[in-house]
């Protein structure tokens, strides 16, 4: 019985480096890709250059207290606010795309973890998320907005951070193209 278990475990160990990153990226695409893209769409400014000039909604979402202090007039905010809102807008479009196609996967996943942490702090400090929406770990409920959901997001994103994009990724294609053919002599 132990020999069968040991053999099965060895097979799973061999499959894990290919299967886990691919599954993590697929799960991210299925669950979070459109969540982030839809959020980014609410931050786009008007016109074809809207990706350069975030909408008022971007400021309300990212800097709720600063916008309130400015009399709900985002134009009163400084260049730092504009830079952060623009970077946030781009991050919500680009980082999920990079993860899904598996390009710069480790860096993009690490960036999304950082984005998720900043998003969570903004929800608590800026938007006042508390109580049931905030939740707490080890409470028997698995549906709290921040502690439960976002913990799962971070763990999901940690897989490609530590294991890369997997065999079905642009990273792997690029790595193969840059590698010398098998059996080639290095000088």
Image (cartoon, rainbow, N blue to C red):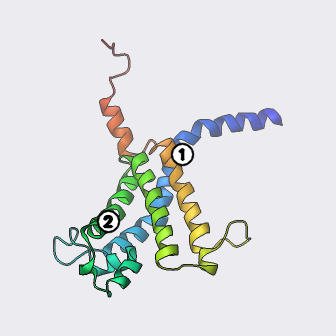
How crowded is the residue under tag 1: few (<14 C-alpha within 10 Å), some, or many (20+)?
some
Q: Residue at x 82, y 35 (%)?
A: 2
Residue position marked by numbered label 2 in the rendering: 84
The number of numbered badges drawn on the structure is 2
Quadrant in which residue 15 is drawn = top right
* Between marks 2 and 1 in the image, the one whose residue lies nearer the viewer: 2
The quarter of the image holding the C terminus is: top left
Q: Earlier in the sequence, mark 2 or mark 1?
A: 1
The location of residue 3, given as percent across then percent down, is 79, 32
Q: Residue at x 51, y 41 (%)?
A: 18
Q: Give the alpha-carbon distance from disc 2 to disc 1, as whole Å.
A: 36 Å
Q: Position of residue 119 (x, y in %)?
A: 46, 68
Figure check: 123 above or below 183: below
Label placed on residue 19? 1
Residue 23 point in image, percent of width and height: 52, 52
Q: Is residue 90 left or right of residue 153?
A: left
> Considering the numbered disc 1 on the image, is that residue within a helix, a strand or a loop?
helix
């Amino acid at each position: 019985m132990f020999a069968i278990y040991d053999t099965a475990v060895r097979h799973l160990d061999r499959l894990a480096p290919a299967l886990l990153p691919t599954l993590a990226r697929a799960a991210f695409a299925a669950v979070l890709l459109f969540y982030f893209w839809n959020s980014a769409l609410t931050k786009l400014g008007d016109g074809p250059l809207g990706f350069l000039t975030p909408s008022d909604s971007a400021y309300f979402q990212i800097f709720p207290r600063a916008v309130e202090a400015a009399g709900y007039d985002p134009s009163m905010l400084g260049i730092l606010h504009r830079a952060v809102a623009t970077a946030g807008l781009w991050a919500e479009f680009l980082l999920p795309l990079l993860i899904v196609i598996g390009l710069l996967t480790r860096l993009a996943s690490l960036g999304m973890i950082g984005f998720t942490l900043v998003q969570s702090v903004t929800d608590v400090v800026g938007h006042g998320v508390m109580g049931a929406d905030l939740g707490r770990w080890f409470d028997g409920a698995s549906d709290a907005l921040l502690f439960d959901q976002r913990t799962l997001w971070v763990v999901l994103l940690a897989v490609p951070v530590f294991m890369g994009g997997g065999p079905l990724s642009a990273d792997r294609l690029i790595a193969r193209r840059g590698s010398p053919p098998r059996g080639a002599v290095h000088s």
